[in-house]
Amino acid sequence: MQIVEWVQVEEGGKMIARQWVGETRESDAEAYAKYLDETGVRHCKGVPGNCGVLLMKRVYDDKAQFVFISFWDSLAAIQAFAGPEYEKAVYYPEDHKFLLAMEPRVTHYEVEHRLQLQGLASK
């Protein structure tokens, strides 16, 4: 699975980070990571204006927490991905089988500084 992929944004252009957090049972972590790659990652990467995706996982207390951050070149691009109510989380048909809770909202941030990441290995 590709963990990080970046594209260059116009010099001086602002980028928006969209963060979603969800939890599964530890026993579902591997299957859900694969499912996220096939759904959310693929969906994001297919929308014009997406500048990359970062998917992180942490295991604790028999749970796996996923932090999914997508990077966008504009609010219009986020709306193309998420719809007009862009602060609502985007879910896929099988999410309810994995997730312990369905958080209704995501958080957006203006990216103030970014580092160009290159040549990262796939998992």
Image: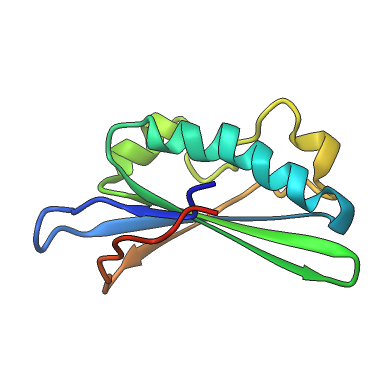
Residue at the spot 74% in from the left edge and 36% down from the top edge: 95
Asked if one can make out residue 2 in the rendered structure from this viewpoint, the answer is: yes
- On the picture, is 10 further left or further right than 86? left
Q: In this view of the protein, which residue sits in the foreground, 3 or 72?
A: 3
Q: Position of residue 123 (x, y in %)?
A: 55, 54
Asked if one can make out residue 82 in the rendered structure from this viewpoint, the answer is: no
Q: Position of residue 34 (x, y in %)?
A: 66, 41
Q: Quadrant of residue 94?
A: top right
Q: Quadrant of residue 14?
A: bottom left
Q: Position of residue 69 (x, y in %)?
A: 49, 56
Residue at the spot 56% in from the left edge and 52% down from the top edge: 106
Q: What is the basis of the colouring in this image? A: rainbow
Q: Compared with residue 120, is residue 73 higher up or lower down, i.e. above or below?
A: above
Q: Position of residue 46 (x, y in %)?
A: 38, 30
Q: Compared with residue 28, is residue 61 higher up or lower down, i.e. above or below?
A: below
Residue at the spot 58% in from the left edge and 32% down from the top edge: 39
Residue at the spot 49% in from the left edge and 54% down from the top edge: 3
- On the picture, is 121 further left or further right than 64? left
- On the picture, is 68 further left or further right than 57? left
| Total numbered labels | 0
Q: In this view of the protein, which residue sits in the foreground, 123 or 48?
A: 123
Q: In this view of the protein, which residue sits in the foreground, 21 or 8?
A: 8
- Name, please, the residue furthest toward the top: 93
Q: Compared with residue 27, is residue 117 higher up or lower down, i.e. above or below?
A: below
Q: Compared with residue 28, is residue 49 higher up or lower down, i.e. above or below?
A: above
